Amino acid sequence: ACICEKNKRVTNCRLVDGVCRCEAIGSSLPVSCDTLTSKCLLMKAEMTHSKSGRREKPKDAFEDTDGLYDPECENSGAFKAKQCNGTSTCWCVNTAGVRRTDKHDSDLKCNQLVRTMWIIIEMKHAERSTPLNTESLNKFFRETITNRYLLNGRYITNVLYEEPYITIDLKQNSSVKSVGDVDIADVAYYFEKDVKGDPIFQGNELNLNIDNEALKLEKTVVYYVDEIAPEFSMKSLTPGLVAVIVVVIVAIVAAIVVLVSSNK
């Protein structure tokens, strides 16, 4: 027997060739504990715990089921492109398991699992008397993401501080991701669980400490950008999401204008 340090939602652990290998709860698919577990298997395990009443809950926790569902996973641990809610309602997802189409009946066709190439993690810290040191903040988050979540530093494209907001950009398209690299969708899920006080790691909580001072976060939101645009009908979009899409389109148009102007 062994302890899976990078995933507490496993069972039947054993040491194989010096590596702790287990079965993911809910799917019984194999998990190697020397790297991150895929988001799909983690969500399935979490839903299994939730249904059985055995899910570990942090102190002062309250229920938040937004975005959480019982997913269908490939044997590789990846999300199946088509997901359903146990009835006849189905939708297509990206590699992060996030819905990218309207909900349809079971006849829906999802031809491919579209890759999430850019993840934006936006955090808001609690009110402070002085701003955080930008250099220390940048160093802390880059080192944490590289060392704790095993993500190659080249995929961390930006750490931006605009008090009180901290924004981290992770970019990893299919052409640059190497075999063995952890996926940015898995990293973002582990990170989000950490900062919300429900770590996936076994007995290893994230210490949010910058310049020997604890960093208190009030809110964390994760945004996803896919290699192929999502297929939502306008009537299904919230005003906030429409605004985000408009901003992205305006930014792309502005970039094209600048490029054309510079080529003249």
Image (cartoon, helix red, strand yellow):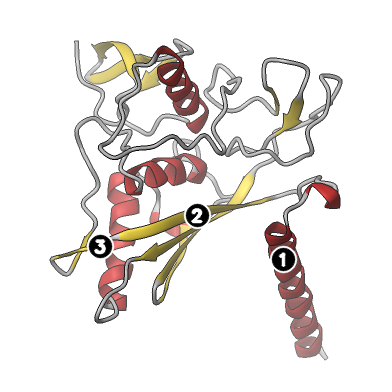
Q: Earlier in the sequence, mark 3 or mark 1?
A: 3
Circles 3 and 1: CB atoms closer than 8 Å: no
Q: CA distance from mark 3 to mark 1?
A: 30 Å
- Image check: 174 left or right of 184? right
In screen coordinates, is 259 left or right of 193? Answer: right
Q: Secondary structure at mark 1?
A: helix
Q: Which residue is mark 3?
A: 215
Amino acid of disc 2: Val
Q: CA distance from mark 1 to mark 2?
A: 16 Å
Name the residue type under label 1.
Ala
Which residue position is annotated with label 1?
243
Label 3 near label 2: C-beta < 8 Å?
A: no
Q: In this orientation, does residue 175 appear?
A: no
Instruction: Identify whether 242 is placed above or below 37.
Output: below
The image quarter containing residue 213 is bottom left
Circle 2 is placed at which residue position?
Answer: 221
Query: Which label is found at residue 219?
Result: none
Residue at (22% x, 19% y) in the render: 18
The mark that comes first in sequence, 2 or 3, is: 3
Q: Nearer the viewer, residue 24 or 124?
A: 124
Q: Which residue is at a point 75% across and 80% down the rendered structure image?
A: 254
Where is residue 54 drawn, in percent x and y?
34, 16
Question: Residue 186's x, y, as percent?
Answer: 46, 39
